[in-house]
Amino acid sequence: MTAFGAVILGCAGATLSHSERTLFSETRPFGFILFNRNLQDANQIRALCDGLREAAGHDAPIFIDQEGGRVQRLRPPLARDWQPPLDDANAPDAERRFYLRARLIADELRTLGIDGNCIPTLDIARPETHAVLRNRCYGTDRDTVIRHGRAVVQGCLDGGVLPVMKHMPGHGLGTLDSHLDLPRVATDRGTLDKQDFAVFKAFAELPLAMTAHLVFEDIDPRPATLSPVMNRVMRDQIGFDGLLMTDDISMRALTGTVPERGIAARKAGCDVILHCNGDLTEMQALCAEVGAMDTQAQARAERALMARAAPKPVDIAALRAEADAFMALDPHTDPA
């Protein structure tokens, strides 16, 4: 079997250009990711997903960030609107809410040809967590995040969608927006081991994870995505042996050219480079430098694809009605 390209790529618009088709055919990306610019209507989305897989020459997973709240690419009438995850964290029926969210989102995604969702978000929310992340989290303490994260994972898998846990090994202590700046965390290693890192250790068996673009100053001066030291923490201490993808390699938390970042992430131990903005020139340069997966990454990728399964039979209408009943209740606000 020809190895997959060590990339997950976006595309520029609602249809593929000739140049995009050529690049994807030549490089055989492991997968793709969709954003608002790619989403018009159901038929167009299904056709785009078919086109991406055809161009890549394999049944490539197609990912999206459909968390609920501010970060959900699909909106009505294509998908239900959800309140931010943290708003549900203190509800007495929170686990059920998180499961329903993930299971119904999975149903919506599968209907459109999308089979990967970049959830659960396993970062612990603190008062100081940057607003770009805070209300996307599942709780303000380790055990709550683990409990709600497990419900989300089960909802994804029951719905036939691959979950991607993020942002490993934990982004909740970040006080800057890594889309724009590089967050630095001064918290001591012992606290990190017991809190943020421990959450991800509870999910070490998952097939896919996404890295965090932030520095843990007590461990290594390099961003976790580009740090061999932090990659060893993720592999050896957290125990994750699934496919490790970077967060978007084009984010401004990282320095250097996009290809240089991709090379550094591969050398650090990441299996696959995520590039989201759809810039063709950047994608061409990145693919030329990072090339195909090595043997170990390819084996992890194949295991991840084997985790895709048909959705379990369920009465979707009944689940929707249950979710409607939850949403009709007084909103549960972001816990302090």
Image (spheres, helix red, strand yellow):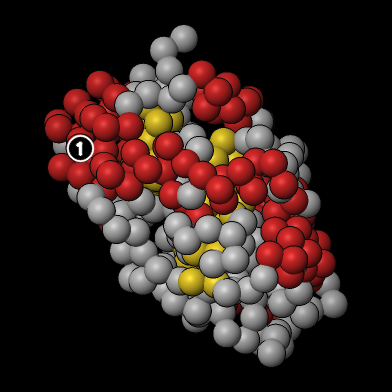
In the displayed structure, would residue 288 be above or below residue 268? above
Q: Is residue 291 left or right of residue 154?
A: left
Residue shown at the point (54%, 67%) measured from the top left: 217
Q: Is residue 69 left or right of residue 47?
A: right
The location of residue 261, given as percent across then percent down, is 32, 47
Q: Quadrant of the C terminus?
A: bottom right
The location of residue 315, given as percent across then percent down, is 75, 48
Foreground of the two, 16 or 307: 307
Residue shown at the point (46%, 22%) measured from the top left: 294
Q: Read off the residue under disc 1.
A: 285
Foreground of the two, 117 or 26: 26
The location of residue 279, given as percent across then percent down, is 20, 48
User: Few, some or many C-alpha atoms within 10 Å of disc 1 (few <14, some 14-19, many ≥20)?
Assistant: some
Foreground of the two, 141 or 10: 141
Q: Is residue 28 left or right of residue 163?
A: left
**What secondary structure is marked by label 1?**
helix
The location of residue 202, given as percent across then percent down, is 78, 51
Q: What amino acid is labelled 1 in the image?
A: Ala
Can residue 100 be seen in the rendering of this structure? no
Residue that lies at the very extreme toward the right in this rendered image: 92
Residue shown at the point (63%, 73%) measured from the top left: 187
Residue shown at the point (40%, 68%) measured from the top left: 182
Q: Is residue 219 left or right of residue 91?
A: left
